[in-house]
Image: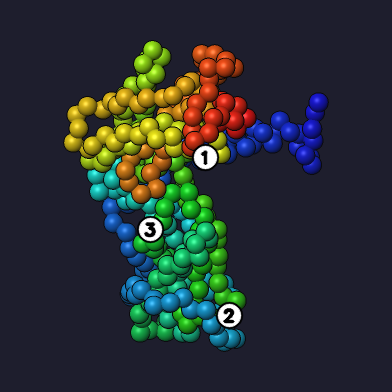
C-alpha cells in the first residue's frame, strides 16, 4: 500500500522526519563563558541593561517619522553556560538589530515560557547625544534568560517606548535530552545506567548502577509499568558517599510489566527504566502467578493492565 500526502509520498515524509530528528540530536549548542548584553556599533553609542518590573503591555501610536522596520533580523537560539564538567545551564540567546531614531530610546526583549506563561523581560537603553547617528544600525545580543530543557518559549522584541505594531516575535523550542550536547551536560538528563542479575530461587534482583551524577543520592525501585510505573514497595537509596553501587530488590512473582527504575535525587531528574520480563520468562500463564496487592488477589493480566 502506498500513501500520498499532498505532493510527497509517505516514505518521503518519513525520511524528512528522520532527518529532522537526526539534526536535533546531532547539532551542537554554543557555549558561552558569561551571559549578558553585548551591543555592536561603530559610532559613539552606549547600551545599558535594566531589568523591567513588568512587561510593557500598553503601547502608543507610533509617530509618522518612525520607520516600520526600526527593528530587524531577530534570531533566537539556545546557548549553554558551564561551571564544570556536566554542571551546565541553558539560556535563550536573542540577536537583533535596531535602527537608531530620535523616537526610540531602546528595546525591550521578553521570553515567555508557554507552559506556565512565566515571562522574563530585559530592557536595553541606548545613549547617544548626536542626531547624526539617526538611521545607523545597532546589533544587540542578549542571553541572560535561563530556561529548562524541552521548554517551548515565545520571544518578543519591542521598542522603548512601546510603539504599537512595531514588534518582532518568534517561537523557539529549547533542546531536550534527545540532543547530544544536552544529554551529556545537563544534570537532569543524566539518568545513569542499570545492569541486573536475577536470582529466581530467592526471587531477588541485584541491580548495579553506573554513570550517575557524582555527589547526589540515587534511587532504585521495582514498579509495575502501566501508563506510569506504579510503585510496589521495593525501593533502595544509594547514598552519594557509598562506594558500593549495587542493591538487592525482592519481587513477589515474575510479571511482564515488572520493571527496574533508577533516577538521581535531584528535581526533575530524568529516569531510566528496564523491564527484564517484558518478553516473557517463567510460567506467566500458570496458576501460581498470583500475587497479593492491596488486600486483593490479581493475576498478571490484571496487574499489568493488558
Q: Closer to the N terminus: mark 1 or mark 3?
A: 3
For residue 113, say whether it is visible. yes
Could you say which disc has been placed on residue 164 in the image?
Answer: 2
Could you say which disc has been placed on residue 125 in the image?
Answer: none
**Residue at 50 percent of width and 69 percent of height:** 157
The image shows residue 83, relative to residue 123, as above or below, that is above
Of 83 and 297, which appears nearest the observer?
297
What is the spatial separation of the Cα atoms under label 1 and label 3, in whole angstroms? 30 Å
SS label for mark 2:
loop
SS label for mark 3:
strand
What is the spatial separation of the Cα atoms under label 2 and label 3, in whole angstroms? 28 Å
Q: Are marks 1 and 3 in contact (CB under 8 Å)?
A: no
Q: What residue is disc 1 on?
A: 228
Of badges 1 and 2, the one in the foreground is: 1
In the rendered image, which quarter is residue 250 located in? Answer: top left
Q: Report x, y in % for residue 102.
A: 46, 84
- Which image quadrant: the N terminus? top right
Q: Report x, y in % for residue 6.
A: 79, 42
Of badges 2 and 3, the one in the foreground is: 3
Q: What residue is disc 3 on?
A: 146
The image shows residue 204, relative to residue 306, as above or below, that is above
- Callout 1 environment at 10 Å: few (<14), some (14 to 19), or many (20+)? few
Q: Report x, y in % for residue 21.
A: 55, 37
Amino acid at each position: 500500500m502506498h500513501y500520498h500526502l499532498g505532493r510527497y509520498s509517505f516514505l518521503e515524509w518519513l525520511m524528512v522526519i528522520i532527518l529532522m530528528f537526526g539534526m536535533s540530536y546531532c547539532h551542537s549548542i554554543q557555549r558561552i563563558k558569561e551571559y549578558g548584553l553585548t551591543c555592536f556599533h561603530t559610532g559613539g553609542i552606549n547600551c545599558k541593561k535594566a531589568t523591567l518590573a513588568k512587561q510593557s503591555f500598553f503601547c502608543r501610536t507610533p509617530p509618522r517619522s518612525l520607520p516600520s522596520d526600526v527593528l530587524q533580523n531577530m534570531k533566537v537560539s539556545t546557548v549553554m553556560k558551564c561551571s564544570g564538567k556536566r554542571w551546565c545551564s541553558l539560556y535563550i540567546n536573542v540577536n537583533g538589530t535596531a535602527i537608531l531614531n530620535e523616537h526610540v530610546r531602546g528595546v525591550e526583549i521578553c521570553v515567555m515560557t508557554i507552559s506556565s506563561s512565566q515571562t522574563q523581560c530585559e530592557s536595553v537603553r541606548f545613549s547617544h547625544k548626536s542626531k547624526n547617528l539617526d538611521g545607523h544600525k545597532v546589533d544587540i545580543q542578549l542571553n541572560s534568560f535561563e530556561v529548562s530543557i524541552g521548554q517551548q518559549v515565545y520571544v518578543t522584541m519591542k521598542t522603548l517606548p512601546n510603539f504599537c505594531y512595531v514588534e518582532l516575535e518568534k517561537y523557539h523550542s529549547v533542546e531536550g535530552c534527545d540532543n547530544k550536547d544536552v544529554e551529556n551536560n545537563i544534570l537532569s538528563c543524566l539518568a545513569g545506567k542499570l545492569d541486573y542479575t536475577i536470582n529466581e530461587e530467592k526471587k531477588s534482583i541485584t541491580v548495579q548502577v553506573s554513570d550517575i551524577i557524582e555527589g547526589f543520592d540515587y534511587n532504585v525501585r521495582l514498579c509495575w509499568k502501566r501508563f506510569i510505573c506504579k510503585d510496589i514497595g521495593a525501593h533502595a537509596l544509594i547514598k552519594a558517599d557509598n562506594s558500593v553501587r549495587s542493591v538487592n530488590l525482592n519481587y513477589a512473582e515474575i510479571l511482564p510489566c515488572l520493571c527496574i527504575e533508577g533516577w538521581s535525587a535531584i528535581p526533575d531528574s530524568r529516569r531510566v527504566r528496564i523491564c527484564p520480563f517484558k518478553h516473557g520468562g517463567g510460567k506467566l500463564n500458570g496458576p501460581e502467578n498470583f500475587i497479593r496487592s492491596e488486600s486483593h488477589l490479581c493475576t498478571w493480566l490484571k496487574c499489568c493492565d493488558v
